[in-house]
Image (tube, rainbow, N blue to C red):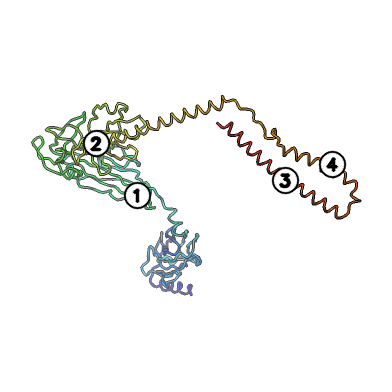
Amino acid sequence: MKRIKIWLVLLFSVFLIPAGVSAASGSISVSGPSTAVQGNKVTVTVKISASKGKLGSWQMDLNYDKSFLKLLSASSEGGGSTMVSYSSNGAKSKSYTFTFEAKKTGSTKVSVSSYEAYDFETMDEMSLTSSSKTIRIMTQSELESTYSSNASLNSLGVSNYELSPKFDKNTFEYNVEVENDVTTATITGKKADSNASVSGLNTVELNEGNNRFEVLVTAQKGNTQTYVINIYRKEKNPINVSFSGNDYTVIRKSDELEELTTFEGKEITYQGEEIPALYNEVTDTTLIGVKDANGKINYAILDEDIVGLYNEIKSNNVILYPQKLPESSSFDKYIRKNIKYDDMTVEGYALNKKSNTVIIYAENMETGDLAYYQYDTENQTVQLYSDELEKYYEELLNKYKYIIFGFMGLSFILFLIIILRKPKKVIKVSEYPSEKEDKIKEEKKDKKNKGKKKNHNDEDLTETEIIEQIKEIKVVKNEKKEDEDNTSKKEKKKRQKLTKDFDI
């Protein structure tokens, strides 16, 4: 039936297509995803193209393993796996799509067979090449295990400017400074993995001061990494200040200042210009924002003039401003030790260099009180310092010290007694025989002799005499046992008495 159809197409073409001479050729491609999830849909595209000449008519059959793929829909002429048609004007290409359901896991191939095409002008059969597509069907978990987790960039920059520091895929924040007349900048970059997606690479508008932009990279597996670029647009008339050996620029926009818990925003006049500031009424402290050469924002304490940077320690709902450590005889047993908190160095007292507890001197920014605080460098917690607890432990240690020394002295005395004493000779109980024991021995001897004499005349004894003799032997045995029991009790009492005599 297929052959009849294509010959009808060819006969129809004879009356429409003028004769010509050319060597026609073309190709057939099969494209689609390399992987598919079991139970999901997968679409395959078949395309026939003429590289020389034009397509007049064609016919192809799609081959696939029905145990792996179930055909759901097709754009072919009959809606099945056969593709047969013609072009009245000649075509350079024709595409068909097939939608399948992935039935089971494994690898399967989709290809075409029984294909042929004829040139539009000459009606000669075209020389065709064909390809195939291999699809690996997996479960969802198997597919996700093949996903890439690479969420890095291979490059990042701002057009016509250099990043500081130089780009490294493991460095995630950069700074760029531009002149005041620069109002836009273009952020560029390339992802390290083709399967990843990137957002934030575009042209951005710049305001005066710092402008923060994020470039988000999402890996195929779903994990992300964020790169930050701070583009600082210079101010027209910056207020430059220097203190503590460093140069800073005063921040003149309130939206660049972060809020601090114990401070409220206000406007002040500094060097003849209105600038934003933060004020703590309890401690009467005024802060202004300053920016260093790297664009980092800090807070400076203003008292007629700038006196230094402000840093605070937050812990256990306490906000402290560390002060210079005063000299105190209360900490003669301690050493001075510097600790790091964020970017600041705080001086304190510690029992030794390895101690995790450091006593610092600070102002409570909520109450205005100055006091010593115990700071745990390991857990980063703070509590008010009190020497009462230290005194309690010292007293407790002294108390137990005397108990320990007393116990050690007593143990030493007992040891000497055991080593130096001379043990007395212990007289065995058996060396004090009683009269009863002598009597028992004599009776045993007599009975033994009688027994020997009677043994010679056992044959002359009557039955009655034998019975009487047995009874007599039992009586003797009972008396013997009773005597032995009495003797054992006496011996036990004697031993107990001797033990008491030698008891320490």
Residue 166 position by quadrant: top left
Q: Which residue is mark 2?
A: 294
CA gap between label 3 and label 2 equals 109 Å
Tag 3's secondary structure? Answer: helix
Residue 262 position, x and y percent, is: 19, 43
Q: Which residue is mark 4?
A: 449
Looking at the image, is 437 positioned above or below residue 416?
below
CA gap between label 3 and label 1 equals 97 Å
Of discs 3 and 2, which sits in the foreground?
3
The one of 208 and 195 positioned closer to us in this rendering: 208
Residue positioned 56% across, 28% down in the render: 418
**Mark 3 or mark 1: which comes first in sequence?**
1
Dot 1 crowding, Cα within 10 Å, few <14, some 14–19, many 20+: some
Contact check, label 1 and label 4, Cβ < 8 Å = no
In the picture as drawn, the residue positioned furthest to the left comes out as 272
Left or right of 363 on screen, residue 402: right
Residue 481: numbered disc = 3
Looking at the image, is 111 positioned above or below residue 287?
below
CA gap between label 1 and label 4 equals 113 Å
